[in-house]
């Protein structure tokens, strides 16, 4: 406690609030840190729960250096305030002490179904329930938490933290129906008849492909699917390539290395500075023995039936007109091959096409569910948010989308 209070004491309580502006959830960071500084942790929790119910999770997994901490004034001359650690501390303490989320009765009598209990669905459910709605969460897995439970490894986010966060949200009186999959166990039409509004938040957790030769060979996996199902091959003594540079790539590479792979390569087309993953995650992966091939691209996966080799090529980075970040271009003649046993694709995620199609809702050209500015889909009273509508794939942005949608659902229902 003392150490964290000392950290809070370093905060300058900046009037311009750059940290708040850089937070996807718009958390009032200076005020909550002030409350921590004064030793009033319950007040700090109250301040944060105006905008978030996932503080114990976001405090641990958000890319803080790309968000709040990256904008912290203290970071100009020394270390930024450790906002993530303070946020997690405030929520851990609240969950331990059993502080409740505050309720009012604005939506008394209104029934809302939330399809998908990940960060977006949980946040939407919580804000609706805090406003008096009777919420039921439908979840295809046996537990709530979505990507946090079935995507982020335990070494980065302990299961206990997710479970406590979920239980706190459910204590608002939210009903759950787990092991229930949309399009299989029930249809959107059935649900819309039973509820006053529906929020779709079943995410986008299908790994995108590189569309290169050999991608259908045995031994090629999707990073999301491996992390979600936990069904891995035996990596002991094997060489594994992970293609991509984001969180899924880092989580997959570190998980596979911990499972005994002889060598794990992360192959990324751009340079380290352009990686979407946080720098400390790259550091951790390197410490654990993961090798990085920056500015390298996979051209082909080679083998008879199963993966045997990769054909790769080196890339140069060029600035193209109208593009904000450097683009990789293959360097002609720099091809090489490398022995490989398994390949993991972590180059992006998309929504489950079959499930989306079964909703009968309009979609975008990227296969996401189309919504208007009020998060409403092409069907009256059916809203959608999070990764399913193409929100930036981070926990905090998904949660923000859930909270925004809850506000719109409230306006629709009142
Ligand atoms: Fe405190 Fe940093 Fe935010 Fe300023 S920018 S209020 S120092 S956390």
Image: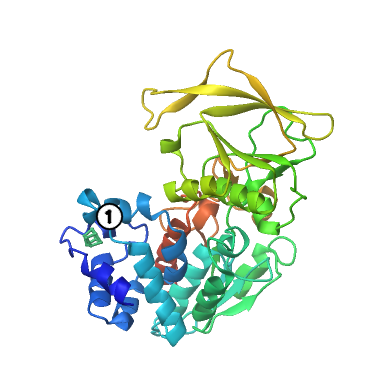
Determine the residue located farthest toward the right in the rendered image: 305
- Which residue was labeled with disc 1? 79
Residue at screen point 68% across, 65% down:
140
Instruction: Using the image, determine if residue 251 lies above or below residue 169.
Output: above
Residue beneath the point at 39% across and 23% down: 320
- Name the quadrant where ligand 1 sits: bottom left
Let me know if residue 379 appears in the view: yes
Q: Residue at x 59, y 50 (%)?
A: 254
User: Where 255 falls versus 315 (above or below)?
Assistant: below
Q: Is residue 236 left or right of residue 73?
A: right
Q: Is residue 106 above or below residue 181?
A: below
Residue drawn at (53%, 77%), measured in percent from left and top?
A: 164
Residue 232 % position (x, y): 74, 52
The quarter of the picture where the N terminus appears is bottom left
- Residue 325: give x, y in percent of width and height: 39, 32
Percent of width and height locating residue 170: 53, 80
* Circle 1 SS class: loop
Answer few, some or many: residues within 10 Å of disc 1's Cα (few below 14, many 20 plus, some between 14 and 19). few
Percent position of residue 18, x then y: 23, 55
In the image, 199 versus 47, the foreground residue is 47
Quarter of the image for residue 304 reads: top right
**Quarter of the figure that contains the C terminus:** bottom left
Residue ranking furthest to the left: 15
Residue lying at the far top of the rendered structure: 333
């Amino acid at each position: 406690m003392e150490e964290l209070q000392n950290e809070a004491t370093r905060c300058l309580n900046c009037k311009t609030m750059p940290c708040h502006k850089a937070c996807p959830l718009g958390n009032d960071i200076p005020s909550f840190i002030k409350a921590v500084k004064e030793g009033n942790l319950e007040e700090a929790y109250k301040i944060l729960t105006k905008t978030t119910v996932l503080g114990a999770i976001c405090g641990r997994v958000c890319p803080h250096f790309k968000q709040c901490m990256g904008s912290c004034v203290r970071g100009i001359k020394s270390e930024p305030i450790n906002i993530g650690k303070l946020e997690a501390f405030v929520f851990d303490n609240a969950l331990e002490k059993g502080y409740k989320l505050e309720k009012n009765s604005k939506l008394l009598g209104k029934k809302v179904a939330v399809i998908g209990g990940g960060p977006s669905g949980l946040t939407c459910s919580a804000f609706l329930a805090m406003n008096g709605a009777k919420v039921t969460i439908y979840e295809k897995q046996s537990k709530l938490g979505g990507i946090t439970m079935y995507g982020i490894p335990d070494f980065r986010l302990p299961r206990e933290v997710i479970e406590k966060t979920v239980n706190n949200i459910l204590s608002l009186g939210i009903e759950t129906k787990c092991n229930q999959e949309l399009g299989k166990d029930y249809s959107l039409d059935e649900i819309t008849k039973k509820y006053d509004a529906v929020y779709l938040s079943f995410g986008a957790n299908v790994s995108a492909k590189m569309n290169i030769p050999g991608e259908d060979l045995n031994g090629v996996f999707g990073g999301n699917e491996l992390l979600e199902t936990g069904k891995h091959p035996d990596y002991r003594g094997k060489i594994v390539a992970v293609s991509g540079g984001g969180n899924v790539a880092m989580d997959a590479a570190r998980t596979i290395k911990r499972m005994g792979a002889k060598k794990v390569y992360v192959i990324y087309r751009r340079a380290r500075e352009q990686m979407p993953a946080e720098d400390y995650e790259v550091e951790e992966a390197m410490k654990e023995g993961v090798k990085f091939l920056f500015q390298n691209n996979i051209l082909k996966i080679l083998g008879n039936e199963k993966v045997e080799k990769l054909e790769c090529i080196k890339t140069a980075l060029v600035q193209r007109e109208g593009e904000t970040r450097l683009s990789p271009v293959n360097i002609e003649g720099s091809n090489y091959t490398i022995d490989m046993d398994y390949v993991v694709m972590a180059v992006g995620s998309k929504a489950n096409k079959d499930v989306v199609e079964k909703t009968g809702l309009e979609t975008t050209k990227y296969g996401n569910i189309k919504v208007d500015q009020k998060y409403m889909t092409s069907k009256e009273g059916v809203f959608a948010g999070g990764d399913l509508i193409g929100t930036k794939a981070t926990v905090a942005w998904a949660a923000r989308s859930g909270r925004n949608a809850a506000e719109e659902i409230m306006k629709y229902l009142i």
